Image (cartoon, rainbow, N blue to C red):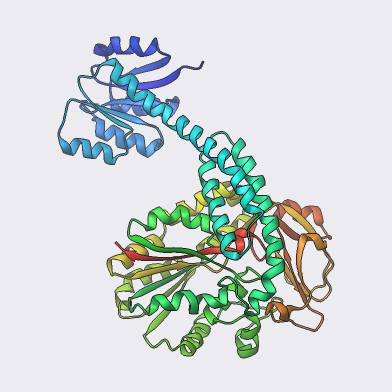
Amino acid sequence: MDRINILWVDDEIEMLKPHFLFLEERGYALTPCTNGQDALDLIDTRPFEVILLDENMPGLNGLETLQEIKNRKPQLPVVMITKNEEEHIMEDAIGSKIADYLIKPVNPHQILLSLKKILNHQHLIAEKTTQNYQKEFGKLALELSGLKNSEDWIAHFKKLIYWELELESLEDTSMLEIFESQKKEANALFAKFVQQHYQDWIQGSEGPVLSHQLFKKRILPELKQHKTTLLLVIDNLRIDQWKIIQKEITNHYVVEKEDAYLSILPTATQYARNALFAGLTPLEIQKQFPQWWKFDHEEGGKNLHEEDLLREQCIRLGVTRPWSYHKITQLHQSQQLIKNLQNHTHEGMTVVVYNFVDMISHAKTEMEMIKELAPDNKAYRSLTLSWFQNSPLKKLLSKAATLDFQLVLTTDHGTLNVNNPSAVVADKETSMNLRYKTGRSLTFEAKEVLDCENPNAFALPSLSLSSRYIFAKEDYYFIYKNNYNHYVNFFNNTFQHGGVSLEEMIVPFVVLRPR
C-alpha cells in the first residue's frame, strides 16, 4: 500500500520525533520542515496529501504561510496547530479554509484522528454517492418510462442534473459513464415526446410555458408586485450552469422561485429570444413586424430589434411603469451599467441581456484553446463558473442587491455537446446552423431529425411554399457531404444549439430577492 505523504512545518520540529515515529508506523511518510518559505518550496516540487502547519513561527508565520499555500494549492488540506487560543487567530485560519484546527500540546492520537478524518472524508463521500446512485438508477429508469407531460420531464431532467453534478466529483468515472448512457436514453425519449406534442403546444393547446409565453405568464406577475426588478437574460444558460453559479449569486440574493420553461424550436437566439421579448411566435413576428425580421440566409444581425419588440409587448399587456433595455456584449457596457445602476431604481423593470455564455460555446467551436479548456460538460461548467466569478456581471448583481432590486434570471435556450454527425444535402440558401436547417431542398436521415414539413404548423416563417425545417435530435449535428471528414473533425465535441434535447429546451427561470 502506498504511504501517505505528510508535510509537517514547525520551527521546533526536533521535539516532534515521537510523533513522527508513531505516524510512520501507521503508514504515513512525513517530511519535516522548519519554516514557511521552505514549506512553499517543497509543495511546489513534491506532492503532499496533507500539511500540518505550526501557527507561531519566526519569519513567515503560520497564517501567512497558509495564505500562500492556498494561493498555490487551494485544494491541499492544511491542519493548523497552535498554542494560541485567541478567537481572531482561529477565525483567520478558518476563513482561510483550513481542514482542521488543533491546540498545542497535541498528542499523536489527535494528529492521527485528524488525518483519518481528512483523508477518509472524500472516500466516504464517494462511497456514499455511488451507493445512492446505484439505488436511484432503477428508480430513474422506471420513472423515465412513465413520464406523461412536460412537468414530469422538467422534474426528471432536474434529477438527472443533480446526479450528474454529484457523480462528476468522484475520481472513479465508472458511475458517470453509466449515468451518461442513462441521460442519452432520456434524450432519445424526450425527442419522441416533443415530436408528438410540439405542434399542439405551439398552436395554443395546454402545455408547458414556451418562449413566447414567458413574459406574460411568468415575468409580468413578478412586475405586478411593484418591486424594482432586474430582468437578467443570460444567453445560452443551461440549468446545470445555473446550479454552478447559484452559490455565487446567493451570496447576495435568496432564491424565492426556481422553475424552468421550454424554449421554442429552433432553440436558437434568432427565434427563441425574439419570441421571448415579442411575446409572439416567430411567424407572428414576421407577419406583424416584417421590418424587424430577417430570414436565416439574409445578411445582418437577427436580434437587433429586441427592445422594439419588448416595447410593443409592454403596450399590449398594459405595462405602464418605466423600463429600460441593455444588451451587454462588451466590457465597457457592463462597467457603464454598474456605474449608472442607481439611476434605474425608479424603473419597474431593468432588462439586461448578457451574451457571454453564448460566446463561450461559439468560441469552443472556433478556438483550439477553448476546446482544450472545455472538452466536456464538466469542464464547460467549470469555465462558466470561472468566468462568472471574475466577471462584471457578478459585480452588477452585487450592486443590484444593495439597491434592493428583485432579480429575475432566465435565458433564451440551452446548448448541447454534439458527437454524432448527420449527413445533409441542401441548396445554397439553406441555413448554416448545425442543429437545425431550413430550406427548400433538404435530404437527410429521417430517424435522426424532427422533420417540420409545414413551418406554419410550428409557427415558423417560411421563405417559400416548399420550405421546411429539420431539427437534430439527441446529440446529432448536421454536416454536408462535401468535405464530410474535415467538418466532422472540426465540429465534433463542440457545443451547439438549435435542435431538440433536454439541455437546449428545458431552461431555467429563477426569481430571487436581495438578502
Displayed quadrant of residue 268: bottom right
Answer whether residue 202 is visible to the viewer in this image. yes
Residue 382 picture location, percent across and down: 50, 49
Q: Which of 34 and 6 is in front in this view?
A: 6
Q: Nearer the viewer, residue 207 or 237?
A: 207
Displayed quadrant of residue 116: top left
**In the rendered view of the protein, which quadrant contains the C terminus?**
bottom left
Residue 407 picture location, percent across and down: 38, 68
Q: Is residue 357 left or right of residue 117?
A: right
Residue 423 picture location, percent across and down: 81, 59
Query: Measured along the vertical axis of the image, is residue 65 above or below residue 243?
Result: above
Q: In this view, does 515 lie to the left or right of 283?
A: left
Query: Measured along the vertical axis of the image, is residue 93 above or below residue 290?
Result: above
Residue drawn at x 60%, y 41% is 176
Answer whether residue 362 is visible to the viewer in this image. no
Query: Measured along the vertical axis of the image, is residue 336 above or below residue 375?
Result: below
